[in-house]
Amino acid sequence: MITLSARIAIAFGAFLAVAEVVRNWGDWEPWPWWVVDYIAVALLLYGGRAALPSRPQRNATPLGGAWGFACAMFYGSFFSHLESLHEKGTGPIDSVSLTMTIGVLFAVTILGLALAIVGSRRELSGAPRMILEVAVLDVRAGESAHFELAFEEAQRIIASMPGYQRHELRRCVEATSRYLLLVWWNTLEDHTVGFRGSPEYQRWKALLHRFYEPFPTVEHYTPLFGSER
């Protein structure tokens, strides 16, 4: 649901940016009345992009905020136009058509907000909801910079896999050629069967496995205690 909400947000933001130009062309209102629409555009595009599953660090929080802002904005716009429905408009669109259009857009913002909220609640429900993949990566001496460049590309591969939630790569303070890879999956099979059995895993291997010495042991953990499930 979050992915659907994110894709709608991107499409809606792009549409809104163009629609505001068409609506106001030749008769621009004072800037405070239309700049708020472009704030909504920016929030929707940013929030939608941040919540896409292809993002290395997916974050649905900005998406919910963007939809909330847009929903409140269209709430005010729809009911103010509804109250003045029979007044003659000055723009290229008549008042009735404009009010109906704003009503439809208001409904879309409600749908997007609902999808974001329900999707977030579903992701937060269940116990346990995540499997944590842990690997200590010892990189050959002098290859750390090349490894980090390769990982920057490789992380896009793993982030696109079904069942992937998020990941972190941390560098050891005491041994700078040692890294800790953490990957959160929905299920163990999403990693061991889905990812490792995919063509994308071969690309992952080609990018990263040549750097390891010795080859790492990969383990999986399930949550027991802590402030985050």
Image (tube, rainbow, N blue to C red):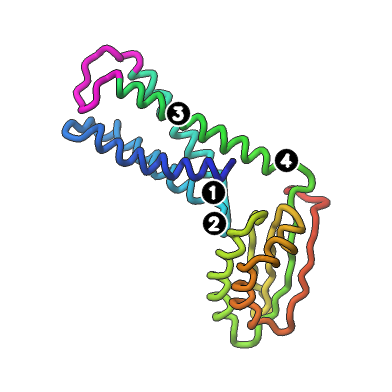
Q: Which residues are magenta?
A: 82-96
- Residue at image location 43% in from the left, 46% down from the top: 45
Relative to 57, say whether 29 is above or below.
above
Q: Point out residue 90 in the picture as x, y percentages from the top left corner.
A: 19, 23
Q: Earlier in the sequence, mark 4 or mark 1?
A: 1
In this view, the residue farthest toward the bottom is 141
Residue 101 located left or right of residue 173 = left
Asked where in the image residue 158 lies, by quadrant, the reply is bottom right
Q: Give the Cα separation between the discs numbered 3 and 1.
A: 21 Å
Check disc 3 and report its element: helix, strand or loop: helix
- Find out whether the residues at labels 2 and 1 contact each other: C-beta distance under 8 Å: yes
| Amino acid type for the residue under numbered disc 4 | Ser
Q: Earlier in the sequence, mark 3 or mark 4?
A: 3
Q: Give the Cα separation between the discs numbered 2 and 1.
A: 7 Å
Residue 77 located left or right of residue 131 = left
Which numbered mark, 3 or 4, is in the foreground of this view?
Answer: 4
Q: Which residue is mark 1?
A: 51
Q: Which residue is mark 3?
A: 72
- Find out whether the residues at labels 3 and 1 contact each other: C-beta distance under 8 Å: no
Q: Point out residue 112 in the picture as x, y percentages from the top left corner.
A: 51, 35
| Amino acid type for the residue under numbered disc 1 | Ala
Which numbered mark, 2 or 3, is in the foreground of this view?
Answer: 2
Residue 156 magenta-highlighted: no
Asked where in the image residue 156 lies, by quadrant, the reply is bottom right
Residue 95 magenta-highlighted: yes
Check disc 2 and report its element: helix, strand or loop: loop
Residue 63: image tag? none
Q: Which residue is mark 4?
A: 125
Check disc 1 and report its element: helix, strand or loop: loop
Q: Main secondary structure of the magenta part?
A: loop
